[in-house]
Image (cartoon, rainbow, N blue to C red):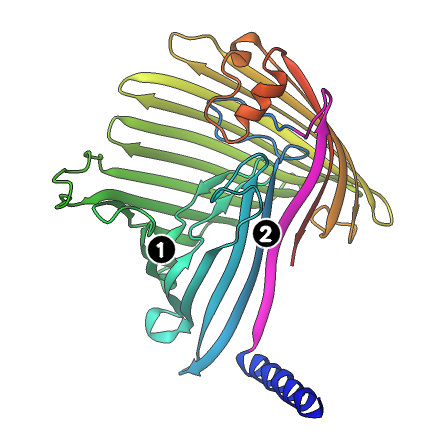
Amino acid sequence: MKRTHLALAAAIFAASGAAQALQVDFSGYMRAGTGINARGGTQVCFGLPGADTKWRLGNECDYVIEPTFTAKIADYEGADWGMRVMPSVYRAWGQTENGTDELTTRFGQIYAFGNKISQLGNGTAWAGRRFYNRLQTGINDQFLENNDGDGAGLENMEVGPGKLSVAFMMNGRGGANDNRFSLPIRYTGLETLPNGELSIYVTPSAQLKSRDQVANTDPAKQANGIALGIYQAIGGTFGGDTLLGFKHDKQGEVKNTRFVVQQNVDIAASTQLSALGEYRLTSNAGVDSKWIALGARTDTHISGPFRVLVELGTDSVKPDNAPTLNMTKLTVAGAVSAGKDAWSRPTLRLFVTHAVWNEAARQVLGDNWINGERLRQVYGDQKSGTSIGVQTEAWW
């Protein structure tokens, strides 16, 4: 027994020493919750078919767990070399995976990197699986840019007045005979205005394919793609900060053009306002569809850990030669948070969410988004619905 205790103590000591030598940092993100709908059963979330996103406060029917471990392994000529590993869980309520409704863990990120390499303009070299080029809006959790996948690249190299990044990305779980690659290029940190920065993203993509020698078939042909995104961030506007965005994305006959305006500002000593407006035009072989989104959230600190949040968002989708789809969602939430600031985390929220939609939206309520079928099952005969629930969110 004594020998066992001594061996265990030695193992713990060795592991502790190794961790200190590696300088492991622990960070991450998580959200989870539970709720009910006014008709009975679990919470449902509200979204409009044809809109890319949904207004997220009190309207997220999923689990996200992303603990991240970053280890510094070596130094060489002033550069830091290491690994980042992120086992992750994502599951929308009601989904199953691998034949089970229990949460399934995967590796969302695992890659090696070298930071601040002087020969690369103090940039980073990396290779592996990672989240990449994630440019996100806040209150609707939209990724204006996103090139997640398996790949390699050079990042944040000091070139001229800005920083240049180039990568080669693929989906490693795609077929061996039919896959797709993208070559995301971004140039960021361009000072164009007082307190302002310009970022430019260019992403060509194309199919990689070969004949299946077993089935003796060729994959269906995919068109080449090209995307251009231009984003201007401005600090100090109206006492807050502004993001102006433009993106044009073309893949064959499908074209998307969008304009985004996002504003964050303190409207009182204890209240922050986040507002977002977006217009998108989608054209598919000459058939157009327009999407307009407008929403805002206030977050007010009351006293101690207590705060109140209100979010109102509306979406309108107008397809060619079809009725306009409309949906408006309102959420009121009370919260306790670890700080006075609107972004203080962890936070726990008790919320009530109510949404209304028109008849045209009711007829297609379950189409084209992840929680739509559950929404149709509960409120498919109605033009409004309500959910009540509790959610926690944290990052560290």
Question: What residue is pinned by disc 2?
Answer: 65
> Most extreme residue toward the right, as rendered?
303
> Height in image: 314 above or below 97?
above
Residue at 58%, 47% in the rendered image = 64
Residue type indicated by callout 1: Asp
Q: Is residue 31 magenta?
A: yes
Q: What element carries label 1?
A: strand
Q: Counting residues from the N terminus, which is met first, the one under dot 1 or under dot 2?
A: 2
Residue type indicated by callout 2: Ile
| Left or right: where 282 falls relative to 239 | left
* Quarter location, residue 210: top left
Nearest to the observer: residue 358 or residue 245? 358
| Left or right: where 321 falls relative to 276 | left
Q: Is residue 336 magenta?
A: no
Q: Is mark 2 on a helix, strand or loop?
A: strand
Tag of residue 150: 1
